[in-house]
Structure formats: C-alpha cells, structure tokens
Image: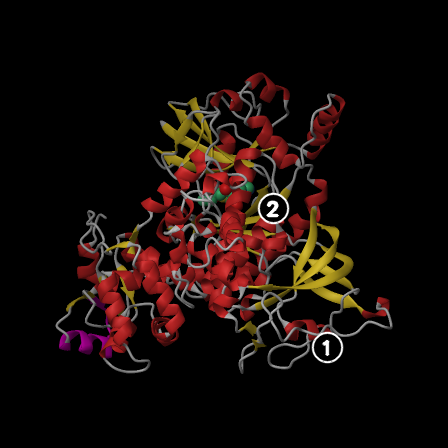
Amino acid sequence: MNGSINIISIDDLNVDQADQELARLAAILGQANHDYHSADTPALDDATFDTLKRRNAAIEVRFPDLKRDDSPTELVGAKPSDGFQKVTHSKRMLSLGNAFMDDDVFEFDARVRKFLGFSDSDGLEYTAEPKIDGLSLSLRYENGELVQAATRGDGEIGENVTLNSKTIADIPHRIENAPTIFEVRGEVYMSTQDFTALNNRQLEAGAKPFANPRNAAAGSLRQLDSAITKSRPLRFFAYAWGEISSSFAPTQSGAMAQLKSFGFQVNDLTKIRQSPTDLIAHYQLIKELRPTLGYDIDGVVYKVDDLELQKRLGFRSTTPRWAIAHKFPAELAWTRLNDIEIQVGRTGALSPVARLAPVTVGGVVVSNATLHNEDYIAGRRGDGAFIREGRDVRVGDWVQVYRAGDVIPKIKDVDISKRDANTAPFSFPEVCPECGSTAVRDDGDVVRRCTGGLICPAQATERLKHFVGRTAFDIDGLGAKQVEQFYADGWIKTPADIFTLKDRYSTGLQQLKNREGWGDKSADKLFSAIEYKRKIPLRRLLFALGIRHVGDASAGLIAGHYGSWALLEHALTSANIGDGPEWDALLSIDGVGSVMATSLIVAFHNDAERASIDSLVGHLDVLNAVQIENVDSPVVGKVIVFTGTMNRMSRAEAKARAEALGAKVSGSISAKTDLLIAGPGAGSKATKAISLGIETIDEDAWLALIDGL
Ligand code: IVH
C-alpha cells in the first residue's frame, strides 16, 4: 500500500502533487477505515492511519481549494457491516482532532481562547484523560433501563449490538437517578492480559490470532452469536454522552463523577488541569505509566471542562472544537536503502521514492519512504540550508525510518560510517524515466518536471486516472487498473476516447467482451456506465479536466459562477492573463486567485489541451450548475462579511454560526456581498458596502436575525 503513496514533504508539494496525493490518501484512508471498522483486519496500524490522516489534513490546510468531497478529514468510521441491524444515532458519534507535538497543545488552547474571546489570563480548565485504544459504543438508557447499544459505524449509523453489550460486566443493565433518556458513550476494550490469553486459545483452536487488543475487542463485540461475546473478557470505560433528556452535570469532570455514581467505570487517571503546560505534564505522566496500565492507550484526550463553554465551542464537521487527542509518538528503525525510484505524476513531477529492505516500525512493515526531491537526497533544502548536516543519501546506505508526525514513512537520518567506499552520490535524472523527454526544473521550484505532456505515458495515464476518479467522472467499472490496461493497449489515450469505446469495441474484430477478464455482461455494463456519464455536471467536468491548481472545491465555485459550459468556455477563451473584464470576473470568484486564473486561461489557450477538451465536450451533455436550495435559514446561500468588533461572540464563533446556517462568510466586500455585519470600529469595508448599496446591520440585529436557529 505504501508503494502507491506519493510521499513528498508538504512544503514541497505543488498543487498538482497535492491534488493527486489527496486523491490517493482518500482512497487509502477510506479503505483502511473500512477495514478498521468493518473487517477487523487492519492493513494500516493506528499510528500510520493517524499520520496519513494528519498529512491529508495538513495538505488541505495548505491547499484548501483541493479539499475533496470524500475527504478523509470527514471520515469518522465506516459504514456498518451487513450482519447487524442498523441504528441511527440520535446524536452523531464524533471523532477527535489530533495533537502530536507540545506546540499543537498550545495552539489548541489558543484556538479555544480565541473562539471564546478569552484572554491569556482568563481562567480555563481542561480535563486530561487516557485515550483508550478500543472501539466506541453508545448505550441508550430509557427510564434507567438499557434499551440499546450501538457501535459508532460511520458516526451517523452504527450497528445494534445490544445483546452482545449486555454480556459485558462493566455495562449496567439498569441505572438509578439518571435522566429519563440517557445515552452513555465510551470505549469497549480488552486488557492486554486477556488479549494474550485469548490469542493463546485462538492458536490452540487453530484459529487466527488477533493483531492487537483493539481488534480482539472489535471482533468480540461484533459477533453474531452473543454467547461468543460473552466468552470474551470485554470491558468498558465511560467518558462521554449522546442524547440526554436533561442535563446531569455542569462540567466534564462533574459528568464523569456522575457516570461513576451511576455504576460506570471511569478512568481514574482523569484530572483537571489549568494550562497547556500542565496538560502536557499530565500527558508525560500517563505516558510513563502506559506500560503498567494493563490496557492499550494511544494518547491523552483534553476536554474543556465547562459544559456551557463546550456548547459554545461546538463542532467542526466531525470533531469538537472543545477537545483534542494528544497522541503518543511513533517509533524509529534502521534499514537498508535498496534503491531510489522515480515516480512521474499527472503534471510530470518527478518524485524520488526510497525502496527499503522491509523493516517493522511500530508494528507495521515499511518498505518505501519519501525522498521528497533531488535537493533532499543531496542533503540540502531548497534555500541551500543543510538537511542531516549535509549528508546525502545513496543507494545501499543504512537509513533511519520513522512514521511520526507529518508524513509516513520518512527518512530521518543516514549512517555514513556504514557506507561502502565505492558508492557514488545519487544522480537525479534530467530526462523523464517514463518517456525520455527532458525533465526541467524551473527557477525557484524544487520539483523537476517531465516536459513530455501527453506523450509521456505516466502523465497520460495519471491524467486518465484523475479523469475517472471518484470526484470526477466516476465511471462504474472504469478504475485506475482498467485505465492503465486500456492505455497500454492503445484503446484509450485521451478522455474523449472513453466515449467512443463502444463504437470501436462492441462489434468487429476486436471486442471488449473478448478481452481477458471481460464478458458480455461486464462489457455491456461498462458501455452503459459510460453512456450514463455523458450527462455530467459542469463542476465535475471542470475538475476532471485536471487543470493545475483547480481542485474540486474551486471547480464548484467556478462552475457556480459561470453556470454553464458555454459561458465558462467563452469567458476563458476570451480572457487575457492579468487584465480585462474576463480576468477581473475570474478573480472576483471567492477562492480564485491569480495563479489559478492563469492556469485556467493557459489550459484554454494551449492548442493540444484545447483540442483534447473540445473533442471531449463534443461527446458530452454538460449540466448547468445549480443554485443552493433554500433551507430554513434567512442567510442560507448568502455571502456575509463581518467587520469591526463583535462584543457578544468572537469573530470565529460568529463565522462558525453563520456557516452552520448555510451562509458563506467572506473576508472582503464585493458586488457579490449580500450582508455586512458591522461592529464598532468598522472602517473601509462599511464605507465600501454603503457605496455598493449592500445591506449593513449591527451585531444585535445579526443576533436577532439568527435568533433561535
Ligand atoms: S471523547 C466528541 N474520550 O477516540 C468526542 N474519546 O479518536 C467524543 N476515545 O471516537 C470522544 N478514549 O472512540 C473520548 N477518553 C476518551 C477516549 C475517546 C478513546 C476514542 C473514541 C473516539 C476516538 C476519537
């Protein structure tokens, strides 16, 4: 799996590489997430999953336009498997954002304070508790009676595991003095001792042992026969709640005490702390205790203690703003660098990948690592500063691999004392290894690129793969593998060829149904799947074209702006880079900057590119972009700008509220602005709004407008 990851330092990624990588990460993490939650057979261990997810999030922060609809950032769990009844959670079961370094903890505290409008000296308390490495479970009590237990599933719909959960000793069947409706959430886990014993029994019985206690717990809870679950020693820690008919405590710590009084196990390493420094001290303590706990934990969770503040802080898509998981670091290992291979991406970027003698790092076998770019291999950064004190990396070297933090796997160091005297520095290719075209490195760019364009098979196939990708044309039965095969045989060279496949290969000498792996049915199915995608929304088409810097989100905004292919095509064809009304119109689209605008115009003015686009569009029926549907909010679909001081909530909180109500919050006033909310001290934005005749209201009027929503 690692072999397919395009592993380049995030700082060095250009937009196309970032785009490609986000697509790959979405596929890898989606699959891993499915395996993790549904199949109990993880291909990625947790630390790898986290680092990949974090890398994905970091790329999204650097390239917000490229965030995909199926972004793993939005992933909470996986769809429930088929064996159990489905349960729709009355309140979504959420995930947690991660902190890996001390700085992340300080930033978390700063974010919370900023959101709440707290100064550094305002008192703010957090709880810090172990992050249990098990699987989350939601227990629903009605009138004190346990009526339902459900796994997280995808966060919205989980599996009904009531019978199985009732076999767990830590889960009370009845609780007293709790609210009438009371959903307790927590973690099902297996102790390390019970895990070892269970695996011994599995081996004796000739059954497959479990990879780790977490998988053993998941596999045991998700048994269709609850007698099996009963025979497995599962435990449960309560740490959160879902729907409750009345509040039962003012603070997180108070709630934990209440949960304990209702008969639940709560973790006694949970402590209240007043500052990030003290949180980190508690993290260090828990980290030291980790080997002695008798159960697996993978970090420490910090939560704002005051529940009123938690409510104000609310959530960002799938994670609360009021909590974060401070994860434990991953491990390091030495191994041999067997080879350096060069991968060529969709835009021709040459990316060096280290092929390693397989080595286990933190429980996972690693055989590939990023080497970022030619400077990195040579021991230099783009600005000439040393990396590894200037030590270069050569084929045959002993290298230290790690999978922590930013990216997995990475090379941390090289042991030159073990280097063979007759090795030579790696010479980075100046021609494309795939097509032999010159590979050039533009001034100021760390990446060397193949200049072959569509002549280069690597670029052409990567473009086709992008074209059929999930957020693009998403043609059933035509994935990366098929595209590669069709390309190799000359059946599909450009996107337009996809739409003539049926004409060319359903009759005559060569037919799709006669190819290996295909038959009457599958061929017909593919032809009709292609037929079906001739009607394509403008946004998808624009994204599928794979124009540099144009990610899915930007494609959506651009499509929304022009509305139809005819208008878009006309505007881009008549646009000039840097000036004129079409250029200004492009830049007026929120999220489109001059780099993206230039890239769009270049693509529409390049003869080969244009011929490919025109020929493709000739086969399509491009659907116009639709406007946002109305929902019950006065600001849905409206472009709103905040300016001046807000007294009743921070700017971040105001923005989050507005976005939650369907508004689009912009930083600047333009003719597209619908509403300006101006607080005291509003300056040029208010003046500009008046001159453009934009409705302007103050904070009180804003709060009145959204009151009760
Ligand atoms: S709080 C709204 N506390 O970690 C947030 N989660 O990565 C609810 N987990 O889905 C979660 N120990 O399965 C929380 N002490 C703890 C936890 C914990 C383990 C799990 C939980 C959650 C996942 C997020």
Q: CA distance from mark 1 to mark 2?
A: 33 Å
- The amino acid pointed to by label 2 is Asp
**At which x and y percent is residue 596?**
38, 71
Q: Residue furthest front?
A: 509
Nearer the observer, 560 or 518 = 518
**At which x and y percent is residue 570?**
24, 70
Q: Residue furthest right?
A: 421
**Disc 1 versus disc 2: nearer the observer:** 1
- The amino acid pointed to by label 1 is Gly
- The verdict on residue 677 being magenta is yes
Can residue 644 be seen here? no
**At which x and y percent is residue 279?**
57, 55
- The verdict on residue 551 being magenta is no
**Magenta region, residue range:** 676-691
The relative height of residue 571 versus residue 526 in the rendered view (above or below) is below
* Of the image marks 1 and 2, the number of the one nearer the N terminus: 2
- The quarter holding residue 371 reads bottom right
